[in-house]
Image: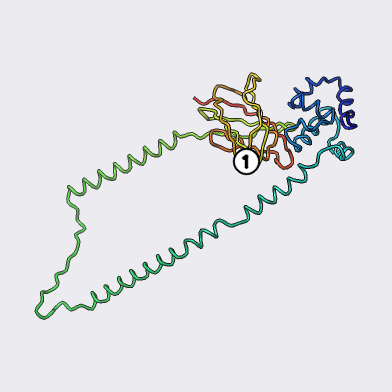
Amino acid sequence: MTELGSRLRLAREEKNLTLDELQNITRIQKKYLIGIEEGNYSVMPGKFYARAFIKQYAEAVGLQPEEIFDEYKQEIPIAYEDDLPEQLSRVQKRSSVSVGATKLLELLPKILVGIFVVAALVGIYYLVLHFADNGDTDVPGGKENVGFQESDKVTPIEKQEDEQEKSEDKAGGSDAEDSDDEKVEQELTMTGVNGYVTTYNLVQAPQFELELKATGGETWVKVTDSNNRVVFSQMLKDGISETFDLTNESEVYIVAGASNYTEIIVNGEKLEYELAPEQYVRQDIKILYEKQD
């Protein structure tokens, strides 16, 4: 047992907490808690999880994580803190390339051709008007030009047809407006943050479809339903997603071990983390669902 493990275990025992009770408080599996106390970090899903789990352990037994990390920095894995800035910098470099500029360069030749064609058509139009204005009505051997003026009067039949078309357009517009009014979009709103737990409300949704997706790295995710039954609990590799139909559940609890690698999508809408994933590696998300009939 390491000095850090002894310190954490002593603090736990002073609070009269068993490993099972600590597991319920932190939602960290018991085998990982034992690994922390024994200094056996090889049982962790990854080195960055070790730091996150130690932080949750310290907070649960009343210790300051910053002091623990500073005092026992020789024992705690540091790979996650070293790798994260590099990963973020790579993302920033990839996103710094302007996609819009590339598309504009590709479209520039087409735009120039379009402008040339329009200019040519305008020139032809003015030439035609010029020769038409300068034409003589008395052409040798030809016929006299006959003027034509469109009548402003509309026959009763034509007027009736116009009124019928207007009434149909107006009726069609009102039907479209009614359908738009009847269409109701779901609302997924954040209602509060308590420690590392963020609560969201899902309303005006006839169904509750949850999609979990790993992007940029591996992440451990756990999902429990309103009866505290485990729906899903395992590692998600990069690019892998899982989808669940939770329409019959009123409450769902999600634990994202690496929130910066975890996307939570509700009925096609991506959930925005209230707490910054770069600062809060593990995040717990509670979604309260009110089914819309």
What x and y, as percent, mark residue 183? Answer: 46, 34
The vertical placement of 232 against 103, above or below, is above
Q: Residue 51 sits in which quadrant?
A: top right
Q: Disc 1 residue type?
A: Thr
Position of 77 with respect to 216 (left or right) is right
Q: Is residue 29 left or right of residue 132?
A: right
Place residue 56 in its image quadrant. top right
In this rendering, position of residue 123 left or right of residue 45? left
Which residue appears at 55% of the width and 21% of the height? 248
Residue with the most extreme front position: 42
Give percent across and percent down for residue 202: 58, 30
x and y percentages locating residue 254 in the rendered image: 65, 29
Residue nearest the observer in this picture, 291 or 41: 41
How many C-alpha atoms fall within 10 Å of the one at disc 1: few (<14), some, or many (≥20)? some
- Residue drawn at (24%, 47%), measured in percent from left and top? 162
Vertical placement of 146 versus 7: above or below? Answer: below
> How is the structure coloured here?
rainbow
Q: Nearer the viewer, residue 248 or 262?
A: 262
Q: Residue at x 68, y 37 (%)?
A: 259
The residue carrying mark 1 is 215
Q: Quadrant of the N terminus?
A: top right
SS at mark 1 in the image: loop
Question: Going 77% across and 28% down the picture, which residue do you hit?
Answer: 32
